Image: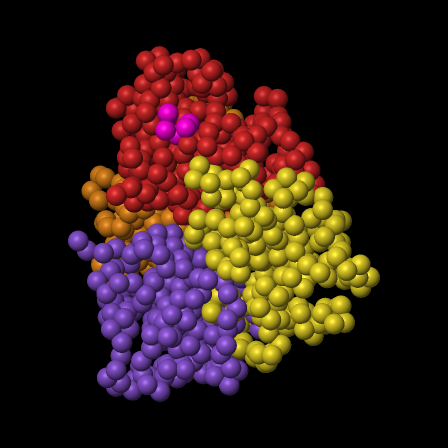
Chain colours: A yellow, B red, C orange, D purple
Amino acid sequence: MLDGGWVSAAAAVYMMHADCRRVQPECVSEVHSINCGHSNNRMSETRRVTLGQHWRLSGRHILSGDKHVEAFEQKVRASFARQQFMTTLGAEMASVGRGAVEIRLPFSLELTQQDQFVHAGAITSILDSACGYAALSVAPAKAEVLSVEFKVNLLSPAVGDVFVARAMVKRSGKTLCVCTADAFAVKGKEEKLIATMLATIIHLTPK
Amino acid sequence: MLDGGWVSAAAAVYMMHADCRRVQPECVSEVHSINCGHSNNRMSETRRVTLGQHWRLSGRHILSGDKHVEAFEQKVRASFARQQFMTTLGAEMASVGRGAVEIRLPFSLELTQQDQFVHAGAITSILDSACGYAALSVAPAKAEVLSVEFKVNLLSPAVGDVFVARAMVKRSGKTLCVCTADAFAVKGKEEKLIATMLATIIHLTPK
Amino acid sequence: MLDGGWVSAAAAVYMMHADCRRVQPECVSEVHSINCGHSNNRMSETRRVTLGQHWRLSGRHILSGDKHVEAFEQKVRASFARQQFMTTLGAEMASVGRGAVEIRLPFSLELTQQDQFVHAGAITSILDSACGYAALSVAPAKAEVLSVEFKVNLLSPAVGDVFVARAMVKRSGKTLCVCTADAFAVKGKEEKLIATMLATIIHLTPK
Amino acid sequence: MLDGGWVSAAAAVYMMHADCRRVQPECVSEVHSINCGHSNNRMSETRRVTLGQHWRLSGRHILSGDKHVEAFEQKVRASFARQQFMTTLGAEMASVGRGAVEIRLPFSLELTQQDQFVHAGAITSILDSACGYAALSVAPAKAEVLSVEFKVNLLSPAVGDVFVARAMVKRSGKTLCVCTADAFAVKGKEEKLIATMLATIIHLTPK
């Protein structure tokens, strides 16, 4: 389990602080340490949670009437709610961490290509939104984001009940933010990696 | 007018043979000469047509009950018709040449992101389908195509009445086909370049 | 001759003004019209030149002791001369137009990979420098450029006597500039397309 | 420590079996489980090693006259030794695991661009070779590899004493292999992420 590793680490970072319903400053700095390349991973295994747990828990989190949602999460969720295309696709914002966002998309025939796999464009759409919102979650309070460019590798046909896009900030600079995202097809309890994105997002600050 | 150059050349190649309703062998070899990098461009200016003309003419062409549609075009249009996601978006196959495909997508609020621009994912979807079908149009008769990967640069906000994706085969090999595509926003008689794609498509031949 | 089309158009734009040894303002605006997507290509065929001609002529141009070199060209050539890595590779700046740059790299065994083709990294290096300098040639006088990201498709093995990278500005915005570039292997009088790049460059202005 | 996570996991997988000087079958399957997206990461923290350790250990490993080098590693190292361009750059193969390769490149003025940072092309070259050899390390015994395409994001100026490219197989299919790689600048004991690559490699099997 290599590639999934950082995702589950992200989940862990996010979940460690689930009790207090806040993302603590130390958590944030840990998330940002993705940039440094050092291996000072001291999280114990017991704190690790599976992605499935993360996803379900954060799902409940959204519905729980929680008053302590962070400003960055409110901003991300408000913007996502204005993306009519996400509604058209049937996509939902599953979880929002500092620098880590997850969007899910249930299968529908209306999303398919000629072989009844979900169209690469639909998968790319949730990957792109996930990257954009991961970038927004670490942006200054008044900044907006815009996708500059992205590359997607399609790794397996998009066959499944639900598709999940998980994006992470790889490096956040003054102007540009680079994110990676993976898309998984979920079938029962199985998740399969079907696509991966490397994206550049620009922070736009109103003058 | 540089970048549009090759597109209008493609339109010209396609239109030159519009009378006889066939893409002649010499046309095909000319299209394939994109790979060789030589400058044997002997098309006279009088044969050149604007992209707008191309698009309108080829639009009429589709509706004209023409019996002489080439096999590759039939194959491409039949496959496109099975892409339910294109119907969901409201996209139409505007023209199919050998190695050159155009898809158009009328604006709809249902396609928009948070600023009411059309979502990058929707524009990417028609760029991806256009590249895939450009690759299919030069593939062996029994081959199918699948997108391996693509990169999109978003150059301007997608604001317009109609969006047009124009894809061209850049190099077609035994297994892999590389295509480029541009997306334009059309507003009245104006076209504006809004995105560009560089894509790798694989030819799959059933055994 | 499709893809080469815009390159030869670029050559033509550049060469049209070769007599007066200046890139005229109308030329510049024509180069910039790459962004608009319109098909107002009114250059007559007689003004077109082959890429080979372009390359040879501009080669002479460099050596001719010409006094009328534009400021943007001086800036580009001065920066290129400071790129020690280009010297290490043996690469030369062949021509510099407004928004269009050509770098050539003679074959050397020292550049090869395991099959004695030139290494993709060496080809990418001249493509990257060509894109960067194409972006620099249209940047404000005091601005510098930095590559943000690029994608390269390797289309054919790099076998030849000389390798040529030709870059063009696709869209130049306030902060970011998107360029495309093609690499060709030259063998005698033959040129073969071997690679293509789509790149994002950032304009940095000192405060 | 998020992004580095999978790299250190790779190091751990590789190092766990360092005693017996073999990559065990179970190790290999673990490396391949990068594709599945599940979080069955059961490696204890005590088995984790830092990247620095990994690198130093594997460095020693190379020099130790070890007789038990796996066939895939021999194949990778033999091919790397034939890449004259790597010698020209001064690059060394630091470690070869199943699906995980590390190449290091000491700083030299001869590799620099106009600001005396190492040229993006030089960094891309070691990233590309690292991805290619990661793909080769999981390929069938007689297969060769060729880069199809890659995208690089340049995240920070390449300033340091040594540059390290670490590549991992993300997904290996019948024909195509997708790899990710990160490049780090090493300065004393500090490592800084400076670039990231997403690459597609093709497996070529002689008939």
Q: Nearer the viewer, residue A9 or C156?
A: A9
What residue lies at 43% left-to-right and 40% top-to-bottom?
A115
Specify the quadrant that holds the N terminus of chain C. Answer: top left
Q: Is residue C145 visible in this depiction of the protein? A: no
What residue lies at 45% left-to-right and 65% top-to-bottom?
D34
Residue D148 percent location from the top left of the image: 35, 52
Q: Which residues are magenta?
A: B73-78
Q: Is C193 situated left or right of B146 in this image? A: left
Q: Quadrant of residue A10?
A: bottom right
Q: Is B64 situated left or right of A177 in this image? A: left
What residue lies at 37% left-to-right and 25% top-to-bottom?
B74
Give the mark count.
0
Location of residue B80 with respect to A142 vertically, above or below? above
What residue lies at 49% left-to-right and 79% top-to-bottom?
D43
Residue B8 percent location from the top left of the image: 43, 26
Location of residue B119 with respect to A132 vertically, above or below? above
